[in-house]
Image: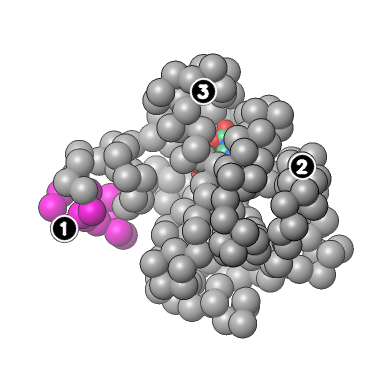
Amino acid sequence: MDITLLLGAPGSGKGTAAARLEKKCGFVVVSSGDLLRDAVARQTPDGVEAQSYMERGALVPDAIIGHMIGELLRAGDSGTQYLLDGYPRTVKQLEMLEDVLAHCGGTLKAAVLIEVNDELVIERIAGRRVCPRCNAVYHAVTLRPQREGICDHCGTALVQRADDTVATVLQRLEVYRRQTGGVIEACEARKMLHRVDGNGEVDIIVERILQSLA
Ligand code: ADP
């Protein structure tokens, strides 16, 4: 089992890039945000606990998300190439991931950091629309579905995420700088960090990611 991490601020385009990479290169994408939103929607005990953290733009406790990701990877196939979107977001989560990999013989191969400026993040998040059924991501101006308000993949009505307000985004950016900075430093120290310019069209960004991993 090989793991590639996709790091970047909220709204940096990790989810959109991950979906393209899944189609193009056969990665299995695991999105911590999608796992948590699913747990909230199902009101599982973890989901009930996670909900209030997510609504205010704070990180969910390491134990909750670390356990969810650990379970998923432990149950996974040993030959799978995983792309983790949104995990790890703290140094503790990175350590938890390394523990799981040590147990199941997996390797942390690389980390890609998608870099964008804050203005772009706010614009992207304010216009972001998501499919509550299949998690496809759109933008009201720059990445519109074929039929207004309807998911191209499954025909479900698109929604705006509860935490995609400007106030919550500012909070999430602050949390990102304070808590995820350490993960970036740790990946840099392990000489596995690839920095990619996240400005521009999705296809171009995906190309940059692939080139950085080649
Ligand atoms: P974004 O990258 O736009 O912030 P995500 O879908 O990755 O969106 O995350 C949404 C929310 O889910 C976060 O603000 C946080 O509350 C929670 N979350 C996601 N991943 C993690 C994680 N690895 N650790 C803690 N909380 C997380």
Q: Secondary structure at mark 3?
A: helix
Q: Quadrant of the C terminus?
A: bottom right
Q: Nearer the viewer, residue 150 or 140?
A: 150
Q: Is residue 58 magenta?
A: no
Residue 96 marker: 2
Secondary structure state at the residue bearing disc 2: helix
Tell me if residue 24 comes above or below residue 54 in the rendering. below
**Is disc 3 surrounded by few (<14), some (14 to 19) or many (20+) residues within 10 Å?**
many
- Whether residue 150 is visible, yes or no, is no
What is the quadrant of residue 109 in the picture? bottom right
Label 1 sits on a secondary structure element that is: loop
Q: Which mark is residue 154?
A: none
Give the residue type that dot 1 points to.
Answer: Gln
Tell me: 6 left or right of 129: right
Disc 1 packing (10 Å; few <14; some 14–19; many ≥20): few
The image quarter in which residue 192 lies:
bottom right
Q: Decide whether residue 152 is among the magenta residues.
A: yes
| Region rendered in magenta | 139-153
Residue toward you, 129 or 169: 129
* Residue located 20% across and 54% down the image: 152
Provide the residue designation for mark 1.
Answer: 146
Q: Visible in this render: residue 29? A: yes
Residue at 44%, 76% (x, y): give it: 204
Q: Nearer the viewer, mark 2 or mark 1?
A: 2
Residue 47, disc: 3
Q: Position of residue 140 (x, y in %)?
A: 28, 50
Ligand 1 location (quadrant): top right
Disc 2 packing (10 Å; few <14; some 14–19; many ≥20) = some
The amino acid at mark 2 is: Met
* Mark positioned earlier in the residue sequence (3 or 2): 3
Q: Is residue 104 left or right of residue 157?
A: right
Predominant SS of the magenta segment: loop
